[in-house]
Amino acid sequence: MPSEPRIFKNKVYNNMKKVEKNVLVLHSAKEMFELVDKVEDYPKFLPWYSKTEVIERKGNELKARLFMDYMRVKQSFATHNYNIPGQEIRMDLLEGPFKTLRGTWKFIDLGDDMCKVEFRLEYDFSNAVLSAMISPVFGHLAGTLVDAFIKEADRRYA
C-alpha cells in the first residue's frame, strides 16, 4: 500500500524511500533465512545495532526491537515479522520513528549451496526533522545491509 502523499501549498510530496537489492549468494536459502531471522545475533556483525530484543516469537511470527546507534544517531524501532521458513520474511512496523517501515526478504533456492536473495525496504520518517537527521544514515545502513549479511554468511558457513 503506497504512503499517503503530504500536501503543502498545493504541492504534493511523498517522502517514501525505497531500497531494493537482488544478489546471488553461495549459501543455501535455508542458511540465509536463518541468519536474517536470528535478530538476536545482529549486534555481533551489524555494528550499527547496539542491541536487539525479541519481544515475542510465536510460530512463524517474530516481534523484535532493534536499537540503532550509529554516528551519534540513536533510535529504536520494533517490527512484526511474518516468516515462511527458508523462503521469506515480511516485516512491518510496530513502533518507532517511522511513519512507514515495511520490507521483505526472499530467499530463492538455486541448488544445494546457492540462492538468490531479494531484499525490498520502504520507509518514511514520522516528521521532517527526524527525516533530515536520520534518513541519510538509515539509507546508507539499509543499502549495505544485504552485503553485511552475505559477509557474515561467508564467515559462518565457510
Image (tube, rainbow, N blue to C red):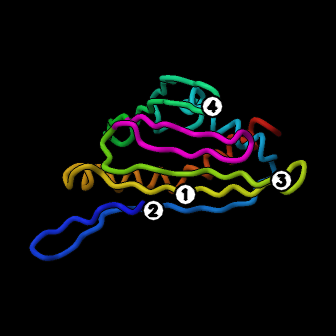
At 17% from the left edge and 76% from the top edge, which residue is drawn? Answer: 11
**Among numbered discs 4 and 3, the one appearing first in the sequence:** 4
Asked whether residue 28 is drawn in magenta, I would say: no
**Among numbered discs 1 and 2, the one appearing first in the sequence:** 2
Asked whether residue 93 is drawn in magenta, I would say: yes
Tell me, yes or no, whether the two marked residues, 4 and 3, touch with CB atoms within 8 Å: no
- Whole-angstrom CA distance, mark 4 to mark 3, is 20 Å
**Among numbered discs 4 and 1, the one appearing first in the sequence:** 4
Q: What span is colored magenta in the figure?
A: 77-95
Query: Farthest residue in the left direction?
Result: 9
Which quadrant is home to the C terminus?
top right
Point out the frontmost of discs 1 and 3: 1
Of 154 and 127, which appears nearest the observer? 127
**Among numbered discs 2 and 3, the one appearing first in the sequence:** 2
Identify residue for label 4. 38
- Residue 120: which numbered mark, if any? 1
Q: Amino acid at mark 1?
A: Arg
- Residue 18: which numbered mark, if any? 2
Query: Farthest residue in the bottom direction?
Result: 10
- Residue 114: which numbered mark, if any? 3
The local secondary structure at tag 4 comes to loop
- Whole-angstrom CA distance, mark 4 to mark 2, is 24 Å
Q: Residues within 10 Å of mark 2 (few under 14, many from 20)?
A: some
- Whole-angstrom CA distance, mark 2 to mark 3, is 26 Å
Q: Main secondary structure of the magenta part?
A: strand
